[in-house]
Image (spheres, rainbow, N blue to C red):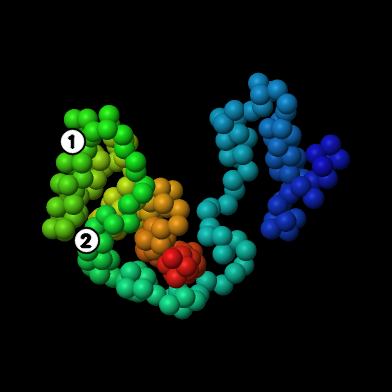
Amino acid sequence: MIRGKNILLLMDSHLEGNFSTEEATVVFDLASRCLQYEPRERPNTKDLVATLAPLQNKSDVPSYVMLGIPKHEEGPPTPQHPLSPMGDACSRMDLTAIHQILVMTHYKDDEGTNELSFQEWTQQMRDMLEARKRGDVAFRDKDFKTAIECYSQFIDVGTMVSPTVYARRSLCHLLCDQPDAALRDAMQAQCVYPDWSTAFYMQAVALAKLDMQKDAADMLNEAAALEEKK
């Protein structure tokens, strides 16, 4: 396609032809250089930014504005699956109820995510578990900043992974008004335990806090479907 120099076919169709030939040629040339067989002939990141930056002549706008889609302010759609107490709490953004559920659930959902050899029960391991225990006490007592610090110590050692710790730290971040960090932790919980509905529920709450209502509703439905299947 590049050899044929079909610029219109190669450019993003959402632009609907709203670009100059000069701009298209610059992007076209850059893409061609990025596809060179020899790595040394490809541009580095600084070159990419230096080439593309002058083309950025509009301020950042939300994608729905670019695409001409009206933004609806109503709440997220009704979930397609029946909601559990956890799902209901997440749909209502009731962080207090989510906290109570996570405290009651404790670590029962972590079973099978770690298999440790005898050799791994070192002093470092005991220190790590002690950090988690301190985090659990702080979490139970609603000292969320301390809980974040203790859970971070547990996570940073890296010997043991716990989706529950990520979910708990995610809620702590939400309660400390840090939705970006909360979303990252919820996604990490999903990485550790891909079919865990709680990880999806926590992502739904974080997305809603970030005002991404459609994504939050989709995630809530996915969580409910996983829970129903289980």
The one of 224 and 39 positioned closer to us in this rendering:
224
The one of 4 and 98 positioned closer to us in this rendering:
98
What is the tally of numbered marks visible in this picture? 2
The answer to whether 94 is drawn above or below residue 187 in the figure is below
The answer to whether 66 is drawn above or below residue 5 in the figure is below
User: Whole-percent x and y of residue 64?
Assistant: 56, 64
**Dot label at residue 100:** none
Side (left or right) of 25 relative to 118: right
The one of 95 and 200 positioned closer to us in this rendering:
200
Residue that mark 2 sits on = 103
The one of 103 and 178 positioned closer to us in this rendering:
103
The answer to whether 165 is drawn above or below residue 117 in the figure is below
Q: Check disc 1 and report its element: helix, strand or loop.
A: helix
Q: What is the quadrant of residue 32 in the picture?
A: top right
Q: What is the quadrant of residue 28 in the picture?
A: top right
Neighbourhood count class around disc 1 (C-alpha, 10 Å): few under 14, some 14–19, many 20 upward: some
State the residue at coordinates (32%, 73%): 85
**Dot label at residue 127:** 1
State the residue at coordinates (80%, 39%): 2
Q: Earlier in the sequence, mark 2 or mark 1?
A: 2
Side (left or right) of 56 relative to 123: right
User: Whole-percent x and y of residue 138?
Assistant: 15, 52
Neighbourhood count class around disc 2 (C-alpha, 10 Å): few under 14, some 14–19, many 20 upward: some
Amino acid carrying mark 2 in the image: Val
Q: Check disc 2 and report its element: helix, strand or loop.
A: helix
Amino acid carrying mark 1 in the image: Asp
